[in-house]
Image (cartoon, rainbow, N blue to C red):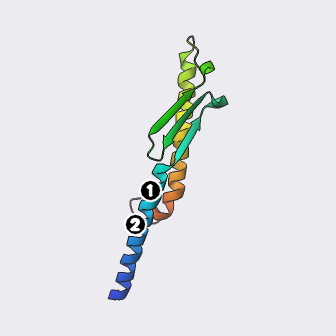
Amino acid sequence: MMNGMNRNNMMKQMKKMQKQLAEEQDNLKQQEFTGVAPDDMVKVTFNGERKMTDIRIKPEAIDPDDPEMLADLVLAAVNDGLTKVEKTTQQTLGKYTKGLPGM
């Protein structure tokens, strides 16, 4: 059985970790992630909350006879951006969720 001192210490550590986690999450939200399609034909920007904040399409990517090409470029850029957000989120927050049940 833990004595009161150890439990107090553990609670302080948990509070400290929660505070650090909240700060890391805030930092992530502030970051920008850019996804690009081949040849930079389409560039999209996401914030750390996975919301798209910008899209740039080069004029040569817009071919009225081939709308599927533009759709493919947009998909490639969006997926690239979301992958970057996900990877950074896991690297940043993974240290807090390791070993925690349900995470």
Circle on res. 18: 2
- Can residue 64 be seen at all in this image of the molecule? yes
Q: Is residue 37 above or below residue 61?
A: below
Circle on res. 93: none
Q: Secondary structure at mark 2?
A: helix
Mark positioned earlier in the residue sequence (2 or 1): 2
Q: Residue at x 41, y 60 (%)?
A: 22
Task: Judge from the rendering whether residue 48 lies leftward or rightward of residue 10; answer left or right.
Answer: right
Q: CA distance from mark 2 to mark 1?
A: 10 Å
- The residue that label 1 is drawn on is 25
Q: Amino acid at mark 1?
A: Gln
Q: Residue at x 55, y 45 (%)?
A: 84
| Closer to us: 27 or 72 | 27
How far from the left and from the top, in percent, is residue 78? 52, 35
Q: Is residue 52 above or below residue 93?
A: above
Task: Judge from the rendering whether residue 62 lies leftward or rightward of residue 3; answer left or right.
Answer: right
Assess disc 2: are there few (<14), some (14-19) or many (≥20) residues with their C-alpha within 10 Å of its C-alpha.
few
